[in-house]
Image: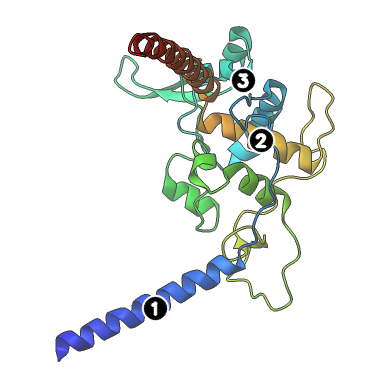
Amino acid sequence: MNRRLFRVLLLAVAMVLGSAATLLAAEVEEPPARDWPHEGIFGRYDKAALQRGFQVFKEVCASCHSARYLRFRDLAGIGLDQATIKALAAEFTVEDCCDENGEPFERPARPADRFPPPYPNDQAARAANGGALPPDLSLIVKARDRGEDYIYALLTGYEEPPADAEPPGEGVSWNPYFPGGWIAMPPPLMEDLVEYPDGTPATVEQMASDVTQFLAWLSEPTMEERKRTGLKYMLFVLVLTGLFYAYKRKIWSRLH
């Protein structure tokens, strides 16, 4: 009897959790589909957009979000030369170990160093953001369904909350593309927040597009090489198939 009751309770809990998950999913607005230059088998990253996106990341996003898998030398992949990368790294300081006394010390970053995180640990990050932990952005595009569309929609989708929506606490904003609607991150972008060296107008939509493309590159910096390799293999298989077919025709022609 107890075992049967336990099964009934377990089933009820599963139904409640499933219903809650369904309701939560129903509240999330589907991000509009956008065309990205790196999509498709022949897609390539837009290097100009990647460089602008890195600027947005460095000047805006990096104040709260880390990118633990990004090293300064990796930025050669977005078109920066070695002198620029070296000068860029020198703008930051990193902790190294150790001096002649065995103590850690700070030094200017080098191209081989990782991009410094804004906080020393997760506890410090939560304390600075009202208990919310800003996610690492290294793989954020791969970690989200339709990652590019989701990130762009999230960055540009802040709006006034519905009249019947009750905020769960202070310091939250309404974004219909975020699960549950309420997000701890305030709108990160505003008009002319950065100044692009190439003269591109820094609208919210432009900055959102640029930083989204940079984060897509950051999630898969070898994408172009992967596509080139795939095309080479497809061409090889196509040629090999043709040779096998011709050989087969020649062999079987003797039997007719």
Q: What is the number of the mark on residue 15? A: 1
Give the foreground label among 1 and 2.
1
Q: What is the number of the mark on residue 162? A: none
At 67% from the left and 75% from the top, the residue drawn is 165
Measure the C-alpha gap from mark 3 to mark 2.
12 Å
Dot 2, crowdedness within 10 Å: few (<14), some or many (≥20)?
Answer: many
On screen, residue 226 versus residue 177, left or right, reads left
Q: Which sits earlier in the primary sequence, circle 1 or circle 2?
A: 1
Relative to residue 188, is residue 170 depicted above or below? Answer: below
Say whether marks 1 and 3 touch (CB < 8 Å).
Answer: no
Q: What is the number of the mark on residue 211? A: 2
Which element carries disc 1, helix, strand or loop? helix
Instruction: Examine the image and state in which quarter residue 38 appears.
Output: top right
On screen, residue 230 versus residue 217, left or right, reads left
How far from the left and from the top, in percent, is residue 186? 67, 54
Instruction: Examine the image and state in which quarter residue 65 appears.
Output: top right
Front position in the image: 43 or 255: 255
Q: Amino acid at mark 1?
A: Met
Measure the C-alpha gap from mark 1 to mark 3.
48 Å
Which element carries disc 3, helix, strand or loop? helix
At 63% from the left and 12% from the top, the residue drawn is 84
Q: Which sits earlier in the primary sequence, circle 1 or circle 3?
A: 1
According to the picture, the residue beneath numbered tag 3 turns out to be 78
Q: Amino acid at mark 2?
A: Val
